[in-house]
Amino acid sequence: MGRVQNTLTVASLLLCLSCQAGIRAGPGETIVPGRQDLATESPATLSEKIARDLVAVRDVIRGLSDLEERARVATTAIEPSAPMPYTQAENNRIRALLLSYLNYRSVLLRLLGYYSAYETIPREDLRLKSFLLAYVSGLTLYREGIVMVSMFRDRPRARAKLNEAEPIWGIPPDIFETVYRNITNPANVGLLGEARNYYALQFPRMAKYRLTEGGELGWLHATIRRQQQFIEDNAVDIWRGQRDALLASLQGVSHGASYNALTVMGLFASNVKIQISRPYVTPAQVQELKGVLHPGDLILEKRNWFVSNGFLPGFWPHMALYVGSVKDLRDLGLTTHPLVRQHLEEYQQPDRSGRERRVIEAGATGVIFNSLEESLAADHVAVLRPRVSEARKEAAIARAFSHYGKPYDFDFDFSTTDKLVCTELIYRVYDEPIRGESIQFRLVQVLGRYTLPPQEVVDMFAQELALDMKREAFGLPPVRQLDFVLFLDADPGSGTARPAGVEEFIRSARRPAE
């Protein structure tokens, strides 16, 4: 089979492995598997992305294992023999588990969508690593579909709860039934076998670059083997009696793989959404922003395929903290601060493309230092500036350094600080009054947990600004906690992001997520 055929076949296989539910992967996204050209990425940039995404997929797999155990405990506790309605606490518990699952799934779909174009990468070692990322993401998605179906198929009350829509968070109805339908689709099971055999054929190439069990990716191959075995062992029960046909599909190789894969890809392409596309915010605009941003600024972003987008309500899915360059830190006197000093060496190291770090943000790989170029690879960007003293901003930056390296919180739970979601990082660095100064973000309770969607930050700013306009008429001092700095709004007509005003920024909060 030639290179082009391999590209079409395996990208299609991996896509179908992911099609557990016909739901969005995140706000406003459409997957086009294998359509992007990763040859346009420099080897240094791609190497850094791969390194980060290997961390992300490892954390996701660990998190899913923990989620499985929590789900078992929860469903056992809340599925009594008497057919009584769920209490609100029980309802929140099972819906929160579903939301966590969908957030993990969202990361895997993005990885799958991005790396499904692995064959376009010229350098073979990077091409093989990209294939492994796509394959393990697809396997994990299929495995978790089996876990979900096995756990809830014979629990009618929990099954019905999983099929309920959650409009606030953008979760559509009938998730469980769609998962069940897709993991038992004979074509998908056959394609799973094709992907498994293609993986085995790559071992001689992987060995050349020490990408097999004995190298740095040994854990990844061990994970792949466990996922493959789990699927083979447990899918038999899901199919309920069709053992021989199932095992033949999982272990066989079809000579018509390319045609079959493309056919099934057509059936499922409309069900999964992730668009991999060039961001509207241009490199030139990013450079201009370096002269506009101040340390301590809050950045809101909407990126069509970024791995932290998840199932957050509203138009804006991500926030980051602008820190500035090492020179900025030095000018502020922060390089000697104990919280900064312990991670200063990592911060002053340029990324693999030679770009300096200027941002701290929480994504699927955890709390990281990032370049502005990487962080603002987005379609919409807005900046808000805290109305606090420079000393309070410096304290916020120092505190942000203290969270460096913490894992991402796929549960969006603000009750603990050992894991952080993107907005929790912002909340934690500004929430505590220091010399009487803080930002009092309004947490909202969702499914029994307090959290802070970026949407709430925009709404808070808009409401306080409107209040200040009324207060100004009476000569009263302002009460708003944030100032508007800029809004770059995607302009599909020009293919870039255009500057927009505060009114448009406020109205953006009312836009649909899709």
Image (cartoon, rainbow, N blue to C red):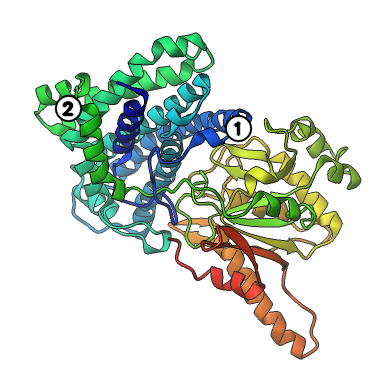
Quarter containing the N terminus: top left
With 192 as the anchor, is 141 left or right in this view? right
Residue 227, numbered label: none
Specify whether residue 10 is in view.
Answer: yes
* The one of 248 and 289 positioned closer to us in this rendering: 289
Horizontal and vertical percent position of residue 239: 14, 32
On the question of residue 213 being in view, the answer is no
Which residue is denoted by mark 2 in the rendering? Answer: 236
**Residue 125, image x, y percentages:** 51, 19
The front one of 90 and 471 is 471
N-terminal of the pair, mark 2 or mark 1, is 1
SS of the residue under disc 2: helix
Q: In the rendered image of this protein, does residue 39 appear above or below residue 284?
A: above
User: Of the numbered discs in the image, which one, if any, rests on residue 42?
Assistant: 1
Q: Amino acid at mark 1?
A: Ser
Position of 237 relative to 311 (above/below): above
| Residue drawn at (85%, 40%) of the image | 337
Q: x%, y% of residue 59?
A: 50, 32
Foreground residue among 169 and 161? 169
**Can you give x and y, in whole percent of width and height, for residue 123 in the image?**
53, 22
SS at badge 1:
loop
Give the alpha-carbon distance from disc 2 to disc 1, as whole Å: 44 Å
Horizontal side of residue 334 vs 465, given as left or right = right
Give the residue drawn at x 15%, y 26%. 246
The residue nearer to you, when weighing 328 against 194, is: 194
